[in-house]
C-alpha cells in the first residue's frame, strides 16, 4: 500500500488584515531574531523599505546580501508545474561531476548521511555537472562544499544557478536582498536568540515550507559571515511560519497558502524510494485520525528524529561553506550553540521548488498541474473508512 496516511499542514495565520495594518502603522511588537526586522537596531529607509542599521551596512563585507523587507511588494503563490528533477539526467556514476583523476576530495561524514567535498566550485559547474550534483545530493542527503565563491558572485548569476534546479521559492515573511525576493536571508544579530527566552532548548526538526503545495527539493545554504570561532550547527537556521512570524516583525509579501494535505510517507521520484514526511513545525494533524491519535504519532516521529543520533549529521560552517541538501528526505533543526557575544551571523538560502509530494510512482506519473486538488474535507471523507487502496486514491 503506497499511502499510509495523509498529513494536513496548515499555516496558522489569523486576522491577517489587522496584523498587516499594525505592521504598516509600525505599532507591532518586533522580535528582531534571525529573519525579522528589529526596530531597536534596524531602520526604515525613506522609500519605506525596512532594512538593517546604517552601521551594520557599513560594517558588512556583503552588503548586497543584507536583508530588506518591502511592505509594498506582494506576490501570488508560485503557479503549479510538473517538476522534472535534474537528477533524472545525471550520469549514474557521477563521472562528469567527479571525473577520474580530478582534483576533488570526498569524505563521508557518516556512512548513511552526508559528504564533504573539496575541489569542486559550484559556480563553475556545467549543466551536465549540475545534473550529477542533483543526483549526488539526493543520494547523500546532505553535501558540504568548502571554499565556494557563490557569496561573491552577482546575485543575478546565483539566481540563475538556483533556477536550474527549479523555480525559486519566495518566502512569505523573511528578509531578502534588495530586488531579489527569491533569496531567503538569515541575519542573526549579536546576542542570545529570543527563541531561548522562554525555553532552555529549541529543537525544531523540519523540512522547509511544507505548507506549500509544491515544497522545495535540492536546496542550498550559503554562509557569508560567521564568528571567528567556527560554528557548528545542523544545516541552517529557520523559524516556523505562523501568525507569530508577523507579530515578531516580518512583513507579509505573499498570500498565505491555505490548508494543504501531503502524504505522511513520500515518494522520491529520482531515488524511487519512500521516506517519512512528517513535519510538526508546520503540520497540524494526520487525516483520518482523531487529534489525540495524530498528536501521539507525530510526537513519536518528532522524538525519533531528534533522538536517533545514527541518522543525524552536523556540519562545521566556516566562510565560503555551501551546504546542499534534499528537502524532501532530510530534516534540519536550528542549534544555538554559538557565542552570543560574537559578531553577526549572515547566511542566505537558495530554494528551488520541486514536485508536489505524493506517495507513489503511480501518483507522481499521473499528477497534473491542471488537475483539481482535493479539499481537506474530501480527504477526510476518503479516509473515513480507513486507509484506501491506491486505485481508490487515483480514481477519486
Image (cartoon, rainbow, N blue to C red):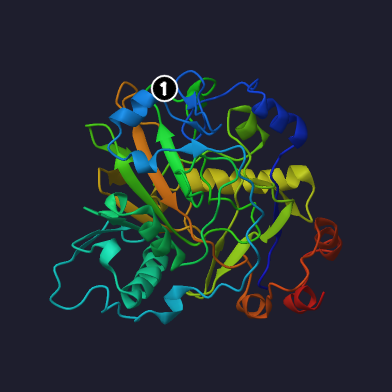
Location of residue 300 in the rendering, given as x and y in whole percent from the top left corner: 60, 46
Which quadrant, please, contains the N terminus?
Answer: bottom right
Location of residue 154 in the rendering, given as x and y in whole percent from the top left corner: 33, 54
Q: Nearer the viewer, residue 214 or 135?
A: 214
Q: From this viewpoint, which residue is outermost toward the top?
A: 40
Residue 358 shown left or right of residue 323 in the figure: right
User: Which residue is found at the position 53% from the left and 40% from the top?
Assistant: 174
> Where 372 sits versus 150, above or below?
below
**What residue is disc 1 on?**
192
Q: Is residue 84 visible?
A: yes
Number of marks:
1
User: Residue 115 lies in what quarter of the image?
Assistant: bottom left
User: Which residue is found at the position 48% from the left and 18% from the top?
Assistant: 40
> Where 130 sits versus 169, above or below?
below
User: Which residue is found at the position 31% from the left and 40% from the top?
Assistant: 62
User: Residue 364 lies in what quarter of the image?
Assistant: bottom right
> Where 82 sits versus 247, above or below?
below
User: Residue 355 lies in what quarter of the image?
Assistant: bottom right
Q: Is residue 15 visible?
A: no
Location of residue 129 in the rendering, given as x and y in whole percent from the top left corner: 31, 74
Which quadrant, please, contains the C terminus?
Answer: bottom right
Location of residue 237 in the rendering, given as x and y in whole percent from the top left corner: 44, 40
User: Which residue is found at the position 30% from the left and 33% from the top?
Assistant: 60
Q: From this viewpoint, which residue is outermost toward the front?
A: 46
Q: Secondary structure at mark 1?
A: loop
Amino acid at each position: 500500500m503506497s499511502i499510509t496516511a495523509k498529513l494536513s499542514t496548515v499555516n496558522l495565520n489569523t486576522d491577517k488584515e489587522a496584523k498587516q495594518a499594525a505592521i504598516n502603522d509600525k505599532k507591532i511588537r518586533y522580535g528582531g531574531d534571525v529573519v525579522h526586522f528589529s526596530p531597536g537596531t534596524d531602520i526604515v529607509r525613506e522609500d519605506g523599505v525596512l532594512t538593517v542599521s546604517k552601521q551594520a551596512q557599513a560594517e558588512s563585507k556583503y552588503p548586497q546580501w543584507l536583508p530588506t523587507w518591502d511592505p509594498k511588494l506582494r506576490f501570488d503563490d508560485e503557479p503549479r508545474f510538473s517538476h522534472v528533477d535534474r537528477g533524472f539526467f545525471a550520469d549514474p556514476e557521477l563521472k562528469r561531476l567527479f571525473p577520474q583523476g580530478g582534483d576533488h576530495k570526498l569524505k563521508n561524514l557518516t556512512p548513511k548521511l552526508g559528504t564533504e567535498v573539496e575541489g569542486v566550485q559550484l559556480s563553475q559547474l556545467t549543466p551536465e555537472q549540475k545534473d550529477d550534483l542533483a543526483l549526488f545530493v539526493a543520494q547523500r542527503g546532505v553535501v558540504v562544499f568548502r571554499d565556494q565563491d557563490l557569496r561573491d558572485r552577482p546575485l543575478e548569476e546565483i539566481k540563475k544557478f538556483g533556477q536550474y534546479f527549479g523555480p525559486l521559492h519566495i518566502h512569505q515573511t523573511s528578509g531578502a536582498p534588495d530586488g531579489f525576493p527569491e533569496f531567503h536571508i538569515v541575519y542573526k544579530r549579536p546576542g542570545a536568540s529570543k527563541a531561548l527566552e522562554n525555553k532552555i532548548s529549541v529543537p525544531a526538526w523540519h523540512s522547509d515550507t511544507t505548507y506549500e503545495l509544491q515544497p522545495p527539493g535540492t536546496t542550498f545554504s550559503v554562509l557569508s559571515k560567521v564568528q571567528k570561532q567556527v560554528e557548528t550547527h545542523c544545516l541552517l537556521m529557520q523559524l516556523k511560519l505562523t501568525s507569530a512570524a508577523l507579530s515578531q516583525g516580518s512583513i507579509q509579501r505573499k498570500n498565505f497558502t491555505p490548508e494543504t494535505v501531503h502524504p505522511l510517507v513520500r515518494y522520491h521520484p529520482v531515488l524511487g524510494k519512500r521516506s517519512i514526511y512528517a513535519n510538526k513545525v508546520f503540520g497540524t494533524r494526520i487525516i483520518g485520525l482523531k487529534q489525540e491519535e495524530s498528536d501521539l504519532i507525530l510526537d513519536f516521529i518528532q522524538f525519533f528524529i531528534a533522538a536517533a543520533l545514527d541518522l543525524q549529521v552536523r556540519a562545521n560552517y566556516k566562510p565560503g561553506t555551501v551546504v546542499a541538501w534534499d528537502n524532501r528526505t532530510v530534516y534540519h533543526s536550528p542549534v544555538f550553540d554559538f557565542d552570543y557575544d560574537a559578531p553577526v551571523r549572515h547566511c542566505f538560502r537558495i530554494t528551488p521548488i520541486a514536485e508536489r509530494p505524493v506517495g507513489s510512482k503511480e501518483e507522481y506519473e499521473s499528477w497534473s498541474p491542471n488537475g483539481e486538488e482535493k479539499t481537506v474535507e474530501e480527504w477526510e471523507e476518503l479516509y473515513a473508512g480507513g486507509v484506501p487502496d491506491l486505485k481508490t486514491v487515483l480514481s477519486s
